[in-house]
Image (tube, rainbow, N blue to C red):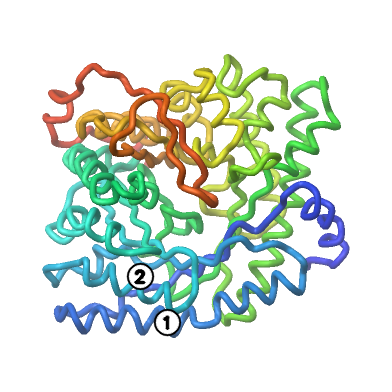
Amino acid sequence: MIHTSEILETLRMIDHQKLDVRTITMGISLLSCVTDDEHVLAVRVYDMIARRAERLVEVGRAIESEFGIPIVNKRISVTPAALITGAIRNPVIVARALDRAADTTGVDFIGGYSALVQKDMTQADERLIRSIPEALATTRFLCSSINVGSTRSGINMNAVRLMGEVILQTAERTAEQSGLGCAKLVVFCNAVEDNPFMAGAFHGPGEGDCAVSVGVSGPGVVKAALEHVKDKPFDEVAETVKRTAFHITRVGQLVALEASRRLDAPFGIVDLSLAPTPAVGDSVAAILEEMGLETCGTHGTTAALALLNDAVKKGGVMASSHVGGLSGAFIPLSEDIGMIRAAEKGTLCLDKLEAMTCVCSVGLDMIAIPGDTPAETIAAIIADEAAIGMVNNKTTAVRVIPAPGTKVGDSVEFGGLLGRAPVIPVHKESAEAFIRRGGRIPAPLHSLKN
C-alpha cells in the first residue's frame, strides 16, 4: 500500500531537486503479428501498437497532472524485431511501421529494432543489423539495440565487427544531424528484457503480451541529501543514498501501479536509475564530487560510483516488489553537465569512463568521438566493454557517436535530454588485426553454474 503522505514527502524533491519519472514505457509483444508477407506484417505491427498504446500518452499526462509528478517521456518497447522479420527480405518496412505507430500514439520513442546475437547470427539477425543505418536515417522515433555477448554465451566477435561498421555507416547516413542516428543505437552485453530506458529498451521474449514499466530518476535529490552528511564516513553516505533511493522508488511504484490500472496492462518493473540531464543540478558527476572529489574522473571516482550504484539498488529493492531494468547510476557523457565539464578539462577520458563502467548501471554512453575513427576501433571499444560485462556478469553497453567531420576538442549539440557531447580522443593505435579474427570469445569459467 502506498499512502498519500509518502507522495507529500516527495513534493519538495519534485519542486526543488528535479525529481521526475523519466519514462512510462509500455512493452508490447509482436509475436502474434508474424507472417511471411512483409506488407501484412507491417500493417499488423502498426495496428497492434496503435491499439495497445492508444491511451498511453493520455494516461501519462493525466497522472502527471493529478499527482503533480513530472513524467518526462512516454515510450513503447516491442519484441526484438529480428524475431518477427525472419520470413521477409526487407526489415526496414517494419522499422517504418514502428515509426508510424509511435507517431500515431504520440510517444517520444519506440525501442525494439533489435537482435539478440550473443552466440551467433541467423540470416534474419544479420539482415536487420545491416539495415540499421537506413532504418535510423529514415525514421524519427525509432531506437535500435543489439546484444552481442553474455556471461553464459561469451562474445560474438563477428557481430562486434559488424556493429563497428554499422555504427560508422549510421553516423554517415545522419551526418547532417551530427550523427544523431548513433544516439539511438546501443550495443549490449547481457541486455535485460525489461529495460524501460532508451535507446536500449525492448520487450523481451520472456515477457507477456503487454507490460507497463516506469523509469525514475533523481540525481538532484541524492546530491541534496548528501549535502547534509558532508565529511561524514562512507557508511553514513551509503545509508543516506539508500534512504533517498527508497523514497524516489516509491514515487515510481505509485506511478507504475496507477498507469497499469488505467491502461489495463500488467505492472512490469520500476527501474530506479540515476539518469542525469544537461540541466544544472541534475548530475551524477555532482553526486560524486559531493563525496569529496574535486572533479569527476580524478582518482577515487570509480570507488565513489561503486558506492553510489550499490546503495541506489539496495534502497530501490526495499521500496518496490518489482525493481528491474538497469537500476543504478547512468553515466551518459553528453547528458550530464558535470561530466561534460570534466571531459572538457581532460580529467574524464575514455579509459576512465571504461573503468567506471565496471561499477555503474550500463556502460560507455552518449560519447562523441572523432568522425574519422575507424570501424575496427569502434568494434574494439565494443569488445572491451562487452568483456567487462561478460566477466563481471553485469549489463554493459556502448553508445558512441563518431560525429562526421569532427575532431578532438569539438562539441556536438543534440539538444533536449541528449545534451551536448564534447568530442574526446580514442587511441590511434590500430586494433584491425584483432577485430578481423572474428569467431567467438568463450564464456568465462564461472558461467558454468548448472
Q: Seen in the image, is 49 located left or right of residue 237?
A: left
Q: Seen in the image, is 94 located left or right of residue 207?
A: left
Q: Position of residue 142 (x, y in %)?
A: 36, 62
Task: Write down the residue under mark 1.
Answer: 50
What is the quadrant of the C terminus in the image? top left
Please state which of residues 214 and 92 is positioned toward the viewer in this rendering. 92
Q: Earlier in the sequence, mark 2 or mark 1?
A: 1
Task: Write down the residue under mark 2.
Answer: 99
Q: Seen in the image, is 160 located left or right of residue 254?
A: left
Residue 187 seen in render: no
Q: Amino acid at mark 2?
A: Asp
Q: Amino acid at mark 1?
A: Ala
Q: Which label lies toward us, 2 or 1?
A: 2
How far is disc 2 from disc 1 in space, using C-alphas? 11 Å
Q: Position of residue 403 (x, y in %)?
A: 33, 38
Q: Position of residue 387 (x, y in %)?
A: 33, 31
Residue in the image at 29% along x and 50% along y: 174
What is the quadrant of the N terminus in the image? bottom right
Q: Which mark is residue 165?
A: none
Q: Residue furthest top?
A: 299
